[in-house]
Amino acid sequence: MRNGQEQDCETFTTAGICPHNTRSDRGFVLLIVLWWLALLMFLAMQIISGARTSVLIAANIRGSAAAEAQADGAINEAIFQILTQVWKVDGQTHVLRGSQAAIEVRVDDEAGKIDPNVAPAVLMQAMLRACGASQKTAAELAEAISEWRSLDLLRSTNATKASPYRLAGRSYVPPNTRFVSVDELGLVLGMTAQFLTCLEPHVSVYSLSVPSLQTTNDPMVRKALLEAYPYDTPQPVAATAPEVAVIRVTATAQRTDGSQFRRIAVVRVVPAEPEENFIYKILHWEGSAD
C-alpha cells in the first residue's frame, strides 16, 4: 500500500512535475534570492561608504587648498604693507578676514637674531652657553662654526680641518662657505640635537648682520650679547655687513570648516647691494597644514 505522497507524484509523472519537489525547489530558490539580496545590500553599503569617504577627502583637500591660498595671499599683503610702511616690523599680530577664514599675520625682524655667517666667535660661544653648553664645549663649537663658514689660512689648512671630521666617521668636511640654512648647523662637528633645537628660534642665516641690545627683543639673544660684551664693547666693523632689511612673515589661515594652513616666508625688502628694479626677494618659503 503506497502512501498518498507517492501516489500524487505518480499521478504527475507523465507531466514531469511533482508538487512536493516543486515546494522544495521554490524554497531553495528563495534562499538563493535572499542571499543575493544580502550580497547586493552589502555591496551597496560599501559603495555608499566609499563615496562618502571620497567626498570627505575631496572636501578636506579643497579646504586645505583654500587655506593655503589664503595664507599665501596674506604673505603678499604683509609684504605690501611693509614696503608701503603701513605695518611695522614689530612682531605684532595682524588679523585679516577672508572668505570663510581668518588669517593671523606676524612680521618679525630677522636682524634681531644671530647670524652664524657673520657673528663673532665670542657671540656664538655666549649663545651656546645660554643654551646650556659648558665653557669648554661652547668654545669648541663656536670655533668649529667659524671654521665651517670660512677658511683662515693663518691658523689651519683644509687638510687639518678635514681630519677631525674624517676621524669622527663623517662623509663630509667643512665647505668653507656660508651656512645656507639653520639646519646646516647640525652638521658641525660637536653640535647636538639639543643645542640645535635651542639655537633654531634665535639664529638666522639671512640677516647678514650682528644684532645689538638696541636692535633685538629676543631675551636669549640679549643674554648672549650681555655675556659676550659685558662692557658694551663695540662690535667689530668687519662682522657687520652693509645695512639690509630681512623680515620673517608668518601667516596662519583658519577656515570655518576646520582647515588650517601656516605659511612662513623670509623676505629681503631692501637689497644687500645696489640693484636696479629691486622690489623684494623671497629667501625662504615653507608651509604646513596644521
Image: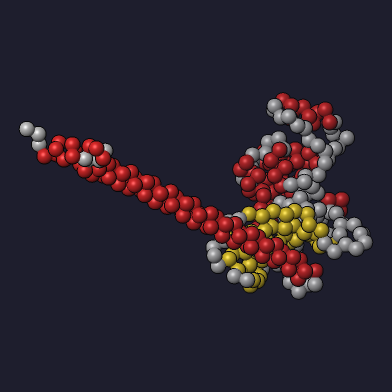
Pick the front one: 186 or 18 = 18
Apparent side of residue 208 relative to residue 91 in the rendered image (left or right): right
Q: Nearer the viewer, residue 248 or 158?
A: 248
**Horizontal and vertical percent for residue 33?**
34, 47
Which residue is outermost to the top?
167
- Who's the residue at 82% across and 38% down the image? 176
Q: Quadrant of the C terminus?
A: bottom right
Q: Is residue 264 above or below residue 161?
A: below
Residue 70 seen anywhere in this rendered image of the structure: yes
Residue nearest the viewer, comparing 220 with 103: 103
The x, y position of residue 87, in whole percent, is 73, 71
State the count of labels.
0
Judge whether 107 appears above or below 86 on screen: above
Asked whether residue 210 is in view, the answer is no
Colour mode?
Answer: secondary structure
Q: Position of residue 130 (x, y in %)?
A: 64, 49
- Which residue is depicted at the point 23% across and 44% down? 23
Q: Find the residue positioned furthest to the left.
A: 1
The residue depicted at 46 percent of the width and 54 percent of the height is 48
Q: Residue at x 86, y 59 (%)?
A: 271
Give the quarter of the image for residue 273. Answer: bottom right
In the image, residue 83 above or below residue 185: below
Question: Farthest residue toward the front?
Answer: 14
Q: In the rendered image, which quarter is residue 192 located in?
A: top right
- Which quadrant of the figure has residue 154? top right
Q: Quadrant of the N terminus?
A: top left
Find residue 157 and report its horizontal and vertical position in percent.
Answer: 85, 31
